[in-house]
Image (cartoon, rainbow, N blue to C red):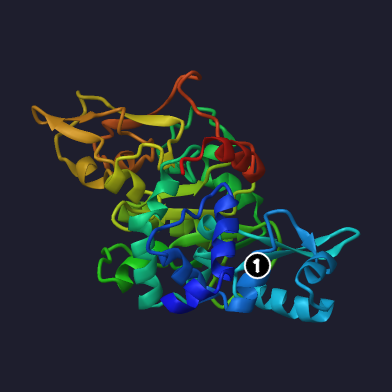
Amino acid sequence: MNDILSMNPQYQLLADELNKIPNGFPRTESGVELKLLAKLFNEEDAAMASTLSMEPRSLKEIAEQNFLSEPEAKQRLIGMVKRGLIDIKREEGLGFTFQLIPFVVGFYERQNAKIDKEFAELFEQYYLESFHRTMLSEPSVHRIIPLEKAIPVDIDVMPYEKASTYLDQAQSWGVLDCICRVQKKLIGQGCDHSIRNCLVFSPKPSAFVRSEEIETLTREQALKVLADADREGLVHSVNNAQTEVYYVCNCCTCSCGVLRGMVEYGSENSIARSDFYARVEEDLCTGCESCIERCQFNAIFMVDGLCQVDRVKCYGCGLCISSCESEALSLILKSPEERAEPPADDAAWRVIRAKQRID
């Protein structure tokens, strides 16, 4: 495959286009990122995809740029859409338009049912060589949202801090396997956490009924997925925006590609914090240490038999609160000066990210 890739510039061109997207697709000396692309795109599709961008383009424009008839171009484009590699939209006056999407969060996650051991090994090599750098830039790809039952009832919180905000606005709900845990398991580094707990939702009714990968849920079943994740000690995270949030990942530091940036590379920017931090009432603490086992961020420690919270390390997920039977722990809303409001939407996120990205 190395010889094929070195002779064919189309994967190089596609990799360069993907790296122009603020999410990032950093290059490597080994060229492992090209092997990943070759697993997903044939040469003709790679050539066509390299002429796309994040801006939607009409079928006519794409066909002309690729010296193809519109029917032939449409067939190739629809094929890539079906494989989760690009996006399709209907634009007034233009008809169907097509656009490039990021590697992460983007077409990598859409390969959930297709990922095999070779792909998982290539991704791991790419992550270690170069891709982990995408988790070091600001604004973070993901942000923490706290367990809703851990939020004090007398606090008026921003809607983007509550999972129920997104679930209530949706018309369709679904669940699929966590690709991070699938990938880690395929390379023999899997953890004990359950796999089928990545929530997705959509403002469109019946959005997932034809999906082979996504299991359709009711709203109540989606809430149960969140509750089960809490019992497992998994952290809720979403894309780092106030609106256009259509999924909730339930993450662990052992497998999550985002949280690994913090654990393996010491980046506090790998994931954005919630508007809360945990606080302990020492008079109520029994020293049971259940909170220590639950904390994914190593923010809780014991001093003289009582738990203490390191605010620098606390990301405000609320897992420690839901495990504290003595109710010694609680979530405290940060002061306005301490809060970091997420970007308004994905477009705003990309603008900020493009300016601050670490290459």
Give me the residue at 52% from left, 35% from top: 356
Q: Report x, y in % for residue 61.
A: 82, 64
Q: Nearer the viewer, residue 339 or 19?
A: 19
Q: Position of residue 291 (x, y in %)?
A: 23, 41
Q: In the figure, is residue 305 to the left or right of 122?
A: left
Q: Quadrant of residue 87?
A: bottom right
Which of the 4 image quarters holds residue 63?
bottom right
Q: Is residue 210 visible?
A: no
Label 1 neighbour load within 10 Å: few <14, some 14-19, many 20+: many
Mark 1 lies on a secondary structure that is helix
Q: Nearer the viewer, residue 287 or 91?
A: 91
- Residue linked to disc 1: 49
Which residue occupies 47% across, 53% down?
Answer: 26
User: Is 56 placed left or right of 164 in the picture?
Assistant: right
Q: With 133 as the anchor, is 155 left or right in this view?
A: right
Q: How many marks?
A: 1
Residue 168 % position (x, y): 62, 50
* Residue type beneath disc 1: Ala
